[in-house]
Image (cartoon, rainbow, N blue to C red):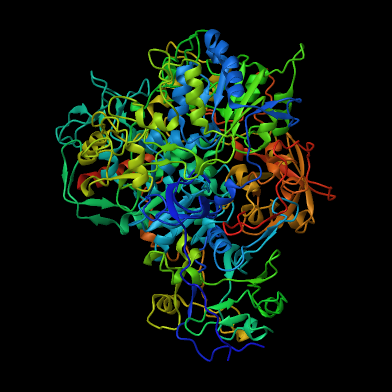
């Protein structure tokens, strides 16, 4: 018998745990950072955090390797070689900030719009937006325009909130979870936790996605839909449900604008003198305002020739082209299966109704003894939204949820504070620049008609990205993907300085990457760069660094202050409001500064209002100082916690606020009372709670908008009505797409489908967040290269085997890439992982790294412009309503290719400003590594 | 040759639910993070930023496609680490006694001070669950977080393997599979938990819960009364509606 060794089963875990917020993707989980001798020893999930409740994904656990990443920038950099060469000189912060001030001050004094400030995957937009507003430029946005603005706007215009941070499935009660094309970096741990939870209960999951991976791999049923046809499929589900009368008539009558009367001449709502939409009360048979106390709205009401939204909706949806038989081929789903899926939705919603014994009172004064739930929950994200028909598709999905009565009811989809929030109480967009003065209001917002567009009297766009113009009127997140292209073209005008943060625009964050590199390095007739100056802030040696003139090196997320604010993209739960901080759990070992603190400094140097005191001195020492002391309005600041003794969310500045957050694990949570937990838009208990918490200034009950009146206003303008008229060449498109009820239309990125028979998509891997993952020694071993996955039939048709190479061609160009077979894939779809491919020399990787030699981007195949129409116009490859980048409208053909030395195209090796990473890593505080 | 204990007091192990594993690799990285810092030598990564990065991992997730004869193709995510076999061939093959199975809980460990890095155990393991560290040249394997599960410096709720604590979808369960009344044993009984390659006679302690049948939704199973057509045109629908509203 062997003698069993003694094992130390109780080693010391760490000296200290510091709790902060993850930034390895957009999910923003709570993390416990274990420290030994002041060094990060281990990162795990924070059990007390509302987002992740202790769990943590691969990215989060690998955060430790972000700190030691050799790609980390070390000090401010000044370009000394040609743009794009990677030739830099390290300079001091004083010099860097002086250069930036010298470039920016003249723009502010003469033409603030000449600064284009776009902040990518920024999680501090309420702050960066304020800075841009005080600077006075209209040209600010983050990356929402190329991410998921269709989903956000369709949700907010339709129901006052959307998926992701706006709401979540009722994981505790749902019996059927239907998931459409999700983006893995959005709510990723909560969705995994939710799927695990409902499967444990025996509830079912249906996945609708061309690709059966990730969540779709564990879905009980997989619907491998053809890309871009989700809207058509959803309209057919709506058709089936209406045809069978399986819609929640009571819910529609009470909580939506189904009973609102529509003027037969204008298509606009009949309204009373105070502007409230009118309904017919079934009891009194009179016409009253929608919120009339005690009214019983009639969905079949009529008045002077006006009929209800509901009547128009039935006439719109119940037409032969929406029948399953009419949509089956284009969607790649049999008619029988569509009917089966509709039957399942109806069965769960109506035959498995749930009732919670919670009394509540609605805004008309109706009292209810219980909360009725229709336990179908639906979630979606970028997959259905990154198409030129994405806004209307997302609208259709919300209408499907609403006719089933599954929004804000038990078992359905629930909003998270500060949502629900009607579109009317969001700001409108502002774009009037004045030298030496702030912009006339916040940049981004929600338009309610043509009068809200940001165009001047001659019809000229006020913003560089042409957001809020006739080309994309409801572009609530801007169009970051058009900034470089437009600035290079001088369309609508030339700019002076392009200032960007956390957006890899010379690589994976741009469409048409090779052309963008040309635009960034192009010179005019005088030999000057067409885009004169570029300032960029990043923590790492990304591809974009090489294309900037001045680099402001950021810290990692473990070395900085941040606030995850209710003013911004919050982290709330359906049962609680919450916000959180990041704080420096370690100090940086190099000459880098948190970008937000740098902006505070620049704001003071430039004398921006809100950043200086009356005597001209700096108002805030750094971002932490701003987080504590800034007030958006009295009693409301970036952080809601510990503002007052009763901790409502409102209250005076508390100098100890950040310390209180740190004591409480970095997060503040305020629970919603049980009686306010569902039916929030109409539930007076919730409305009162939201006012107390500072989410609204007064109660804001509202109706879900099945029929979106602002869309009709744009349509009317296109028909020639009103003072604000689109240019003639825009009229036909506006008449087609600005439909107040959801429609589907094919997206046209190619003239002839036969030439480009395949759809090409990307997906974000669960273990990687855009381009950051590849510098991470652990994560790159999981996703070090990205084959192009082809469906079995396409592999056979082209005589391809795993490891072969293929040339993939779109109207914009060709790439040559390695292929792999995937059977669980829509047969007209090919796909690859997003942002694995790297430019040789970037991210401190060996130029021979597989990310550079075998990895590739689909971006080269995607033009930021649609094919020319012969009218001389540059038509953006974006949703015509919101401007969302239509990444997923890409059409391609493939052919077998001889294996090249490296994937094609290649662009030469960038000179790394930080050298290359070490050969061997043995990560341990014991080894001192 | 090294001997296995005749029996162990407990059979600690993992139960991995293939029905809910979404293949996110959270367990892989959490394991790497804990174990490179704790038991034994750190888990090295060679050519970490280079052409052929090769690191030591104690747990990896593989993905397999399944093509049923009649039906849609499926993708199964399959996390794999040491199964802490009762009849562990990696132990009996060890020439120095470095590999051993603990009598108290059945965990299979490598005593790194006695390991000569010969690699015989990795050859003997039919599951490919052992990896020789490229820097330290000692054999590394899943310890079932023996330095967590009894660790008095951790709160009770955290005395579980790192992979179990972190798994977002709750697909990993830890417990005593020798106790028929433990939660994990009950789960195995309920869900038809399986041994991996039982024909090899290794008697693995870890169990896998098979994926539930997929794509079962058909009109045969969905109550058809849920979707009986009332009217396929607006006029017919409104006639039906007016009758229905009368009753509301």
Image quadrant in which you'd find residue B82: bottom right
Q: Nearer the viewer, residue A79 or A456?
A: A79
Q: Quadrant of the N terminus of chain A?
A: bottom right
Quarter residue A871 falls in: top right
Foreground: A476 or B236? A476
Residue A430, x across and y down, in percent: 44, 18
* B187 shown above or below A133: below
Q: Residue furthest front?
A: A37
Q: A666 or B232: which is nearer to us?
A: A666
Residue A548 visible at all: yes
Task: Name the residue: 36% across, 20% down.
Answer: A265
Tally of numbered discs: 0
Q: Locate residue B85, reporting x and y percent.
A: 56, 81
Relative to A218, is A184 above or below? above
Rendered location of residue A426, percent (x, y): 37, 27
**Where's residue A741, x and y in %?**
42, 33
- Seen in the picture, residue A109 relative to A501 is either above or below; the reply is above
Q: Report if residue A744 is visible in the image.
A: no
Say whether residue B51 is left or right of residue B90.
right
Relative side of A526 to A532, left or right: right
- Quadrant including the C terminus of chain A: bottom right
């Amino acid at each position: 018998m062997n003698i069993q060794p003694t094992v130390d089963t109780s080693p010391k875990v760490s000296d200290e745990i510091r709790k902060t917020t993850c930034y390895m993707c957009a999910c923003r989980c709570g993390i416990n950072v274990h420290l030994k001798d002041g060094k990060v020893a281990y990162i795990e999930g924070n059990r007390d955090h509302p987002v992740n409740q202790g769990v943590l994904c691969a990215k989060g656990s690998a955060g430790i390797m972000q700190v030691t990443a050799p790609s980390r920038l070390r000090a401010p950099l000044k370009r000394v070689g040609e743009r794009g060469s990677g030739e830099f000189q390290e300079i001091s912060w004083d010099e860097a900030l002086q250069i930036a001030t010298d470039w920016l001050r003249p723009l502010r004094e003469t033409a603030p719009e000449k600064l284009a400030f776009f902040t990518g995957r920024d999680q501090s937009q309420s702050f960066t937006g304020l800075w841009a507003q005080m600077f006075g430029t209209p040209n600010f946005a983050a990356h929402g325009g190329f991410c998921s603005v269709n989903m956000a706007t369709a949700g907010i215009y339709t129901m006052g909130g959307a998926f992701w941070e706006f709401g979540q499935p009722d994981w505790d009660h749902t019996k059927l979870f239907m998931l459409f094309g999700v983006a893995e970096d959005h709510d990723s741990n909560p969705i995994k936790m939710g799927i695990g939870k409902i499967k444990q209960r025996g509830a079912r999951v249906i996945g609708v996605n061309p690709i059966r991976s990730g969540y779709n791999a564990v879905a009980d049923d997989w619907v491998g839909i053809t890309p871009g046809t989700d809207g058509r499929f959803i309209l057919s589900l709506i058709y089936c449900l209406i045809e069978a009368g399986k819609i929640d008539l009571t819910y529609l009558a009470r909580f939506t604008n189904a009973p609102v009367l529509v003027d037969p001449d204008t298509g606009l709502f009949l309204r009373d003198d105070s502007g409230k939409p009118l309904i017919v009360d079934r009891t009194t048979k009179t016409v009253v305002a929608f919120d009339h106390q005690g009214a019983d709205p009639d969905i079949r009401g009529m008045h002077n020739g006006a009929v209800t939204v509901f009547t128009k909706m039935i006439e719109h949806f119940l037409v032969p082209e929406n029948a399953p038989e009419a949509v089956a081929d284009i969607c790649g789903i049999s008619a029988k299966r569509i009917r089966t899926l509709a039957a399942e939705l109806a069965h769960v919603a109506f035959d498995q109704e749930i009732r919670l014994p919670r009394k509540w009172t609605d805004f008309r004064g109706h009292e209810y003894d219980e909360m009725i739930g229709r336990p179908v929950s639906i979630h979606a994200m970028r997959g259905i939204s990154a198409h030129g028909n994405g806004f209307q598709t997302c609208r259709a999905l919300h209408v499907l949820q609403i006719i089933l009565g599954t929004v804000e009811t038990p078992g359905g989809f629930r909003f998270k504070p500060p949502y629900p929030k009607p579109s009317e109480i969001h700001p409108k967009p502002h774009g009037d620049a004045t030298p030496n003065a702030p912009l006339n209001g916040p940049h981004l917002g929600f338009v309610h008609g043509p009068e809200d567009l940001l165009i001047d009297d001659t019809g000229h766009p006020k913003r560089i990205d042409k957001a809020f113009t006739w080309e994309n009127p409801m572009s609530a997140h801007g169009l970051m993907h058009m900034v470089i292209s437009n600035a290079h073209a001088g369309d609508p005008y030339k700019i002076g300085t392009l200032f960007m943060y956390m957006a890899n625009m010379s690589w994976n964050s741009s469409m048409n990457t090779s052309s963008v590199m040309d635009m960034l390095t192009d010179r005019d007739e005088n030999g000057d760069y067409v885009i004169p100056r570029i300032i960029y802030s990043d923590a790492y040696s990304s591809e974009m660094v090489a294309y900037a003139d001045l680099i402001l090196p950021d810290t990692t997320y473990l070395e900085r202050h941040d606030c995850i604010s209710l003013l911004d993209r919050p982290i709330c739960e359906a049962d609680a409001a919450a916000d959180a901080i990041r704080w420096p759990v370690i100090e940086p070992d190099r000459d880098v500064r948190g970008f937000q603190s740098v902006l505070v400094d620049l704001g003071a140097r430039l004398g921006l209002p809100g950043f200086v005191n009356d005597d001209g001195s700096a108002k805030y020492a750094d971002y932490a100082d701003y987080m504590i002391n800034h007030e958006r309005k009295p009693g409301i600041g970036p952080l809601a916690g510990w503002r007052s003794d009763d901790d409502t969310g409102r209250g005076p500045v508390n100098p100890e606020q950040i310390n209180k957050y740190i004591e409480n694990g970095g997060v503040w949570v305020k629970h919603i009372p049980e009686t306010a937990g569902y039916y929030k838009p109409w539930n007076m208990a919730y409305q009162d709670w939201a006012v107390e918490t500072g989410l609204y200034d007064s109660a804001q009950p509202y109706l879900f908008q099945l029929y979106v009146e602002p869309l009709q206003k744009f349509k009317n303008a296109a028909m020639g009505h009103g003072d604000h008229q689109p240019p003639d060449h825009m009229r036909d498109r506006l008449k087609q797409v600005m439909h107040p009820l959801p429609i589907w239309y094919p997206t046209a990125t190619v003239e002839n489908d036969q030439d480009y028979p395949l759809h090409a998509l990307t997906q974000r891997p669960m273990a990687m967040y855009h381009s950051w993952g590849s510098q991470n020694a652990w994560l790159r071993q999981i996703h070090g290269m990205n084959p192009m996955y082809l469906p079995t039939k396409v592999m056979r048709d082209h005589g391809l085997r795993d490891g072969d190479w293929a040339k993939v061609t779109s109207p914009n160009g060709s790439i040559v890439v390695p292929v792999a077979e995937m059977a669980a894939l829509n047969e007209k779809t090919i796909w690859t992982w997003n942002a694995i491919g790297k430019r040789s020399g970037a991210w401190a990787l060996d130029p021979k790294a597989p990310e550079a030699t075998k990895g590739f981007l689909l971006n080269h195949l995607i033009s930021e412009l649609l094919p020319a129409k012969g009218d001389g116009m540059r038509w953006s490859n974006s949703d015509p309503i919101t401007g969302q980048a239509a990444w997923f409208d890409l059409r391609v053909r493939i052919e077998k290719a001889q294996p090249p030395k490296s994937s094609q195209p290649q662009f030469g090796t960038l000179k790394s400003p930080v050298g290359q990473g070490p050969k061997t890593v043995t990560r341990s505080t014991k080894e001192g590594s | 040759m090294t001997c296995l204990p005749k029996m162990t007091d407990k059979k600690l192990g993992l139960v991995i639910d293939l029905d809910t594993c979404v293949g996110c690799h959270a367990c892989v990285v959490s394991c790497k993070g804990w174990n490179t810092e704790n038991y034994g030598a750190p888990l090295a990564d060679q050519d970490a930023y280079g052409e052929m990065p090769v690191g030591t991992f104690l747990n990896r997730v593989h993905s397999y496609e399944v093509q049923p004869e009649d039906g849609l193709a499926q993708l199964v995510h399959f996390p794999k680490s040491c199964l802490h076999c009762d009849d562990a061939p990696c132990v009996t093959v060890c020439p120095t006694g470095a590999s051993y199975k603990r009598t108290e809980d059945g965990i299979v460990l490598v005593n790194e001070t006695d390991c000569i890095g010969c690699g015989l155990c990795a050859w003997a393991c039919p599951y490919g669950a052992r990896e020789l560290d490229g820097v330290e040249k000692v054999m590394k394997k899943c310890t079932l977080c023996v330095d967590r599960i009894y660790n008095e410096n951790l709160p009770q709720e955290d005395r579980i393997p790192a992979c179990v604590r972190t798994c977002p979808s709750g697909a990993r369960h830890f417990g005593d599979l020798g106790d028929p009344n433990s939660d994990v044993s009950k789960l195995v009984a309920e869900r038809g938990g399986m041994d991996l390659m039982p024909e090899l006679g290794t008697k693995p302690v870890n169990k896998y819960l098979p994926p539930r049948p997929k794509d079962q939704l058909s009109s045969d199973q969905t109550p058809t009364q849920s979707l009986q057509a009332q009217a396929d045109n607006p006029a017919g629908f409104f006639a039906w509606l007016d009758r229905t509203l009368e009753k509301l």
